[in-house]
Amino acid sequence: MEVNVERIRPRLRGDVYVMRVPEGAYIRSNLGGSMLKGASTYEWIQRIAPMLDGTRTLGELCAGVPEQNRAALAKLTLLLLGKGYVKNVLEDRPHTLTAELATTYAANIAFVEYFVDSPELRFEHYREAAVVLAGAGPLLQALTNAQLRAGVRTAPVAPFAESPFDRERVAEHLTAARARDPQQELTWVETADDRLVAGGDMLLHVADRPMIGRALRLPGVARAAGAAFAQAVAVGDEAWIGPVIAKDGDATAWESAWRRLRALAPELAGADLRDHPEQAPSEFLRGPTVALVANQLCFAAFRHLTGIDQGQAADRLVRFDLETLETATHAFLPHPLALPALPDDPARLARLAAAPPVDDEELGRRAVDCVDVRTGVFAEITERDYEQLPLFVSEVVVSDPVGLAGGPFPVHGCGESVVESRQRAVRRAFERYAAVTADPRRGDRLHGADVLTGEPVEVEAAAVLPARSPASGGDWAEAVSAAVVAAAGAGVGPALAAATEPLPRLDLDGAELTGRGERYRKLLEIVDERFEVYDLSGLLGLPTFAFTTAHGTVACASGLEPGTALERGLEQTLLAYQSRSADQPGYAPEPVPQLPAELRGEPRGAGAWPTPVSLDEVVARLTRDGGRVVAVPLDHDPAVAALCPFVAQAAVVHG
């Protein structure tokens, strides 16, 4: 295929380096390196490099050399173009940068060119942008210097009062900057919110201590002024940089990031969302460390205003360790309390009923978006050093999003494989997270669905959240059923307190166990864990069993099917043994009501097994004193509910 040399205006990338080697020439850039063979290749590249400045088309270049050299020039240029060392700038938009400025900021322009087109024009946009610099102390001084070195023509500066700001030092930075760029200047602006960003294109804020109230407020100030925003806030021995919020972006992004951070570290300075000017800056925030933090924020603004990061969501935060100088990027989801308040919408019940199912495998994939050690909904999914026999055990550390759980907490899952234990731990983590996520702005009453009719019903919010027996499923119907069973099973304690007659003990030799239940029973025999099973079904109206060992009652399990309930109870009994024998109480089953000795009856006769029940029968038992059973979606965190939509709490509603 012929190439139209008039449609190519070649320019050698600024990061290209060429070295002579015995085979010919070795050429490299940030794109990588290549070996170009030929005895005269190095000389040819050196000869044509000055010509590849983007001012002429390839046809014009060829016309300017002897005819016998034109084919070689075109061939080598096209080869470099194909490998990415030369760029076709024919479609680049015009700019008004002087040649002197283009030379002064050649490295900055070359960096832009590596990612996007029209680098001179994009750099010019950055240079002419009004980027307001707000903050205090050495961090603001370093940020001002960084902006001048990056090439802005005018830097409006707004010093706050909590840390000393050395204007003389900043004047020295300006004098040094003007030595290479005489057009640069500084202006001083007021720190009042309504005047801070007036006419600005972007606001950059730095704080050398946890000025969290201000950090929460300023993104909205920038958004109201039609400006982009980013900030760096030092808290303890860490600085948190970003996210970059576009002028039409989500002004709540930084608040979401901070609330996610405090949900995993409630002891963090500034976790109360207030300014703390009394907090001394970190001892490591000095000298070059100050410059590194400021440069990172300046670089983020440069990438945004030149369009390098165009289209990227404001869902990343950079953590800079002031002691080690290590950086890490942390992803976060929107936090419900950072978002605008939403009314409780009964229409979502119909949407849930019609929503496509989400199985355990898909839920595990979705959970990846929730995991981050500092800003995640879940800090980590791990097996730690837990014993993995006879059951596999996994752990998920769950954040405390609104402070109802007393801090982050672990949940566990077990199974016959590590995949299963992880999937179960993830599902349990979603359930427990939803159970402690309450948005009080939704009001005192929530909407749920009548379990039997599907009709929307109002429920007192205090009767639902924090949820005591959350349950989930692959779809809404499955979640509702699991929530009703969980609510019925939660009545074991009161039922035992009211019981007066001994409860029959079951002989599992006559039980119709599931395949998994039978395997668990054999494993308990192998480890010589003696246990007894008592039938509580008559107390609760659905198959329910208590499992006792020499160490007390270790499990209570309910289900619509006796075999399912027995399987769960046997699994919990095995897990209790494993936890105790390995001296790892962290994943022991949650404590259950103890079955008193006087309620432990004699073995039941053969054939006297509880029978399966329907969901309607369980509902009838729960409402024997009146009322209706309502399943309320636990969805007060919209971002997490979109990933795991089918989590519910069942409640008995009267009136």
Image (tube, grey):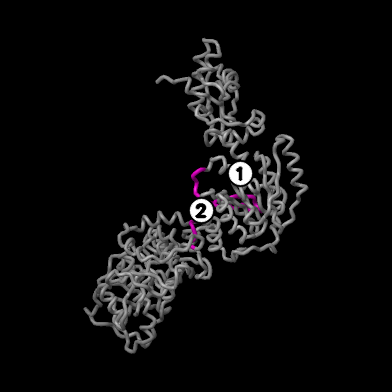
| Amino acid marked by disc 2 | Asp
Q: Choose between 232 and 227: the one closer to the eye.
A: 227
| Amino acid marked by disc 1 | Phe
Which residue is labeled 2 in the image? 250
Locate residue 598: give its quadrant. bottom left
User: Is 496 situated above or below 229?
Assistant: below
Q: CA distance from mark 2 to mark 1?
A: 20 Å
Looking at the figure, which quarter contains the N terminus?
top left
Q: Secondary structure at mark 2?
A: loop
Circle nearer the viewer, 2 or 1 = 2
Looking at the figure, which quarter contains the C terminus?
bottom left
Residue 313 at x, y percent in the picture: 49, 49
Furthest residue in direction bottom, as rendered? 500
Residue in the picture at 56% in, 23% down: 55
Relative side of 602 to 260, left or right: left
Q: Dot 2: few (<14), some (14–19), or many (≥20) neighbours within 10 Å? A: some
Q: Earlier in the sequence, mark 2 or mark 1?
A: 2
Relative side of 491 to 83, left or right: left
Answer whether residue 567 is visible to the viewer in this image: no
Relative side of 322 to 1, left or right: right
Locate residue 163: give its quadrant. bottom right
User: Is 511 situated above or below 85?
Assistant: below
Locate residue 221: give its quadrant. bottom right
Residue in the picture at 46% in, 62% down: 396
**What numbered label is drawn on residue 624?**
none
Answer whether residue 234 is visible to the viewer in this image: yes
- State the extent of the magenta-drawn residues as a range: 310-336
Furthest residue in direction right, as rendered? 168
**What numbered label is drawn on residue 299?**
1
